[in-house]
Amino acid sequence: MRNVITNNPFLREKDIDLSKLHVTFLSETAQKDSLKNLEALSPGPDRFYAAAHEIYLYCPGGYGRTKLSNNAVEKALSVRATTRNWKTANTLFEMVSKL
């Protein structure tokens, strides 16, 4: 979890609204060629960055309006996934850090 939190590439950008950040955890590494399917879903202001086992999302219009929903990611990459907002991801990190 520490790597998930520290490796978010959007945190290095100026003017990123943390409330618009999300991370999608993948059940397995997505095939590189399937990432093209994901790219086709984000023609607008929503952006993503694919890492080994997660997809970092920045949805300036809100997650409820993005085409990069959890279901869409699962279909595009052919893997199971679960998405959490950035606040929840940080809370999960804090919880596992106390163990």
Image (cartoon, helix red, strand yellow):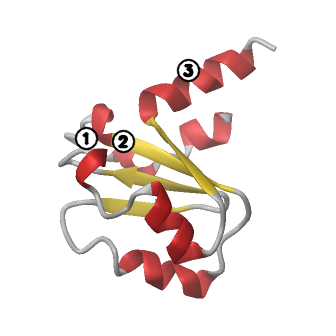
**Identity of the residue drawn at 53% across and 26% down:** 90
Residue 29 falls in image quadrant? bottom right
Identify residue for label 1. 16
Three-letter amino acid code of the residue under disc 1 = Ile
Identify residue for label 3. 91
- Label 1 or label 3, whichever comes before in sequence order: 1
Q: Give the Cα separation between the discs numbered 2 and 1.
A: 8 Å
Q: Are marks 1 and 3 in contact (CB under 8 Å)?
A: no
Q: Secondary structure at mark 2?
A: strand
Tell whether 99 sits left or right of 87: right
Nearest the eye: 99 or 67: 67
Quarter of the picture containing the N terminus is: top right
- Label 3 or label 2, whichever comes before in sequence order: 2
Mark 3 closeness class: few <14, some 14–19, many ≥20 residues within 10 Å: few
Tell whether 99 sits left or right of 22: right
Q: Secondary structure at mark 1?
A: loop
Nearest the eye: 60 or 72: 72
Three-letter amino acid code of the residue under disc 2 = Leu
* Residue 44 percent coordinates (x, y): 19, 68
Three-letter amino acid code of the residue under disc 3 = Thr
